[in-house]
Amino acid sequence: MRLHNPQIVIAEASEYSAEALALYKQLGEVQLFLSPDEIGFEDAIAISNVLVVRLAKVWNAASLAQAHHLQYIVTPTTGLDHIDIAYCETRNIKILSLQGETHFLDNIPSTAEHTWALLMASMKRLVPATADVLQGVWNRNDWKGNNLQGKSIGIIGLGRVGRQVARFATAFGMRWLAYDINEEQLRNEAVQPVPLIELLQQSDVISIHIPGTGNDNFLSAELLQHCKPGSVLINTSRGNVWNEEAVAGLIEQGLIAAVATDVIHDELNGHLTKSPLWQLAQHNNRVLITPHIAGATYESMAATEIFMAKKLQQALLQ
């Protein structure tokens, strides 16, 4: 879709890649905002042809109502739960994202690294141990952890991130199991397919790497009952893929050892404090929550921002 000198609005420009910004400025007139709530944003989006976003807001009929000339939304993400895809289709707004960019994404390690950080923090009790020391307590017996070597990790979703996590597991001497609805993914990794219930029953650590779209309540309350007693649950995918109330219940009942998540259901709608996991974390140090920062490293964000600027450039030339 050819556009001559398009109006480009970057909605969350804080610490944006200088190289990506330079590319956008070569393509058209660029306006930068630190937040879509900033004064002047509504006027800017009303004349914009291209909207460049991150994850601060849900882009739907309400938030795009004034964007009468919008033709592209550019998002440096694989997940699209922050964009109303059906609405954009009715408006003929094209979404440019990282979905399907497998070759490029294979070199982006941030989400897998964060997964491993959550895993290590949970297994070694790092966060509560550190908090205890800050209170003036020095008691190593209160914070005994577990070795990773010899443990089993079950990876749900053996895509890019799942494969990277599997490599980390191998380096730490862990046995890994995998479940994926795409059997080709499993064949490519030369691993025997494992039924999901069997994976839950056998895994000391369960790590979730499936897309949010189409996977609401994938790990239902019924399925979660099959988790191995004393296991650890890790989620760096999306908050809608599991039943948060059921996960919180497993912790409260002492059926699993810990949960660590980078995502919360309805996190984009400002419902953080309504989350059963957030509520449980207020008094239970076996729940660890980070604010969807798995992909938020300087290196990975810069790389994806540059890639998406180039992707828009290619789209405008077609």
Image (tube, grey):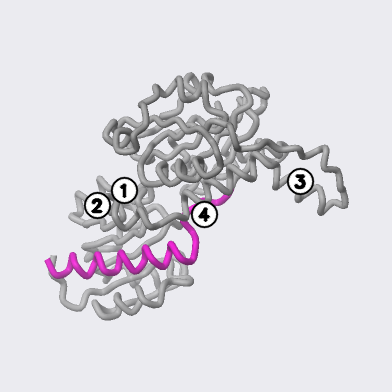
Name the spot of residue 289 as percent of width and height, x first.
Answer: 60, 45
Q: Amino acid at mark 2?
A: Cys
Q: Earlier in the sequence, mark 1 or mark 4?
A: 1
What secondary structure is the stretch in magenta mostly built from? helix
Report the residue marked by disc 4.
293
In contact (CB < 8 Å): disc 3 and disc 2 = no
Q: Amino acid at mark 3?
A: Ala
State the image quarter where residue 50 is shown.
Answer: bottom left
Report the residue marked by disc 2.
88
Q: Is residue 302 on the magenta stretch? A: yes
Q: Residue at x 66, y 36 (%)?
A: 280
Does residue 271 lie above or below 42 as drawn? above
Secondary structure beneath dot 1 equals loop
Residue 129: image tag: 3
Residue 84: image tag: 1
In contact (CB < 8 Å): disc 1 and disc 2 = yes
Secondary structure beneath dot 4 equals loop
The magenta region covers 290-318
Number of the front mark, 4 or 3: 3
Name the spot of residue 80 as percent of width and height, x first.
Answer: 34, 49
Secondary structure beneath dot 2 equals helix
Q: Earlier in the sequence, mark 3 or mark 1?
A: 1
Does residue 283 lie above or below 1 as drawn? above
Q: Residue at x 26, y 74 (%)?
A: 7
Mark pair 1, 2: CA separation: 6 Å
Indicate left or right for 6 with 156 as reference.
left
Name the spot of residue 276 as percent of width and height, x first.
Answer: 59, 34
Name the spot of residue 110 as percent of width and height, x first.
Answer: 47, 55
In contact (CB < 8 Å): disc 3 and disc 1 = no
Q: Say if residue 36 shows up in the picture.
A: no
Q: Residues within 10 Å of mark 2 (few under 14, many from 20)?
A: many
